[in-house]
Image (cartoon, helix red, strand yellow):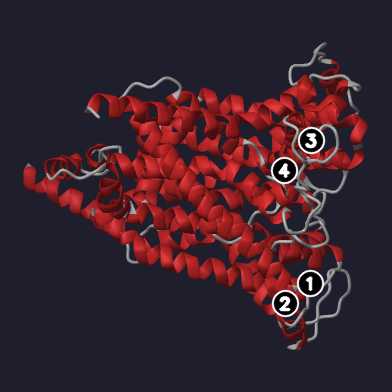
Amino acid sequence: MTPKVMARLADAASYLFMLVTLLFFAGPLLWLLSLALRDRREIYLGVSRFIPKNPTIENFISVLTNNFFPTYLWNGLKLASLSAIGVLIVALPAAYAFSRFNFRGKGLWMMGLLAFQMISPLVIMVPLYRYFSRLGLLDTHFGAIMVYIALGVPLAAWLLKGSIDSIPQSLDEAALIDGCSRFSVFWRIILPLSGPGIASVFIITVIAGWSQFLVPFLLLTKTNLMPIGVGIFAFQGMQNASSMQLLAAACLISVVPAIVVFLALQRLILGAMTSGAVKG
Amino acid sequence: MEASRGRKLAWYQRRFTGAPIPWLLPVIVVIGIFYLYPVFDVFRLSFTDATLIGDRNDFTLNSIINALTSPQLPGVIMATVIFVGGSIVGQQLLGLAMALVVIRGEKRRLLGTTLLRTTALVAWVVPGIAGGIVWQMLFSEAPFGGLNSLLRLMHMHGVAWLSDPNIAPWSTVISNVWRGTAFSMVVMYAALKGIDPALYEAAEVDGATTMQRLRFITLPQLRAAILVNMILITIQTVNTFDAIISLTGGGPGRATEVISLYTFNIVFRNYDLSGGSVISVLMLLISLVLALIYAMFLPKEHER
């Protein structure tokens, strides 16, 4: 066989592999979409109606006008965005210190921070639940946001350090010599220049907060406080075989915002993630 | 002029290099309250007979003995090992294969390369709880179950994806591989891009086959990435809770009750705080050992 034929054969094999994996990854979400667009009778027709005969958006309307669903979405957005702001406030100064200061045990501090990331949220939730119940923080958004912040800080500090590292240190030094304080260097030079890094960490944290389940599941038991993840789990418990189209629609509504934001900012997010992963 | 500038700079550096603590204070407070103290408390609680509702708080070793000799524990460990092990193998192999094909596709300008990468990443962004619901709709044996109705359409027998205790653990693995592979692919992709092309050129000169290049260049060069990947997948999968509770809820019976679900059930269903703390400590030790391995192998990444 000539090399050209070999390459063609390898191309064909690549295409076959790509087709199969594409089906594996896209199939489940397309199936969700297919179910969400059906009416109650078509649900029983399985794959043969992969493309519904009479696609309807009735299910989406029904879910969105449900008493609780808009509240779930709003709570999800509120918890995710407020906690992302909190994560930035806590992690940015630390990231600056990790990037610019030389102090003893810096590597150890950073590894220690990363090690916390490896602790299951469930482990800390076991005792936290008891404190929160004593402090009256159960069923408050404030309590949940504080835990979200703690869970998000380690990764955020690492990613932000990477982004601050890429700002030339000579800028800091020039400003310091001109009489700037460390804080105003941080505030006037570092923060504006690490805009893209801050933005990507913010988005990553918001997406993680939107996906958060365990913390609100344990801390927030009142329906009007639940964020989307918990809400949809409660919704799943209320459905039966004849209302799968509603569950599919609800599920799709909870998934789409995360996907859209991710697709829009894919380059930014992956850049931050891989630079962090490569640096450790 | 230069000298005074240098002196001033040295003064600033002296003054500030020793004072990282104010900058680290927010992190120290948050981590201290929400991680450090709870972790200490988990250790303490595992030596008590505390319950979630009562005020009992006497020190005893019985909780540890009871939790570790529980007849349910071997089953839970087994389910966790299948879930984690299956996910590691599945995500590594699929992630590596996809990264190789994506790189080849980019080089040969094959159509759909970007589509494949993006689709896998979309699955990665899907929240765990929603992922569990999606896969339940695929695995379900009711008429709306996607996979079985596809099998029936091809005149094959349906599979008891979620109701056969021997099959259900593997179904959870499939759903987890679906969600997790994109991350492995990204790590592998970055690592593959980092391999020195001169190695492949040399292999070509020596007349190495594709398989030989994979075995003697690609895989050895990827060793660090594979290890880092393995540990990250393990930690993530051991801690997975949402995707399992919405897919199987631990069933059928207790066939898919992994360690995180087990801890949750002990503490929040049986109100056995001390017993749950013992299992939490077990989870913590697993994480700690993995973190140490991770830390041990990490410097090699920097040297490269």
Q: What chain letter is assigned to the residue under label 4?
A: B
Task: Give the amino acid at mark 2.
Answer: Leu
Q: Which residue is at 45% across, 41% downward?
A: B185
**How many numbered circles does the render carry?**
4
Q: Nearer the N terminus, badge 3 or badge 4?
A: 4
Q: Crowding near pointer 3: few (<14 within 10 Å), some, many (20+)?
A: many
Q: Is residue A218 above or below residue B62?
A: above
User: Where in the figure is residue B130, as x and y percent of width and height?
Assistant: 72, 38
Q: Nearer the viewer, mark 3 or mark 4?
A: 3
In the drawing, what numbered circle is on residue B145?
A: 3
Q: CA distance from mark 1 to mark 4?
A: 27 Å
Do marks 2 and 3 both belong to one polypeptide chain?
Answer: yes
Q: Is residue B197 above or below residue B262?
A: above
Task: Give the amino acid at mark 4.
Answer: Gly
| Residue beneath disc 1 | B273
| Residue beneath disc 4 | B132
In the drawing, what numbered circle is on residue B45?
A: 2
Q: Is residue A187 above or below residue A9?
A: below
Q: Which residue is at 56% across, 69% downward?
A: B286
Instruction: Answer whether labels 2 and 1 touch (C-beta < 8 Å).
Output: yes
User: Where in the figure is residue B156, as x and y percent of width and height?
Assistant: 74, 37
Q: What chain letter is assigned to the residue under label 2?
A: B
The image quadrant where one finds the N terminus of chain B is: top left
In this rendering, does residue A91 appear at all? no
Q: Which residue is at 82% across, 49% downward?
A: A139
Task: Quadrant for residue A271, please give it.
Answer: top left
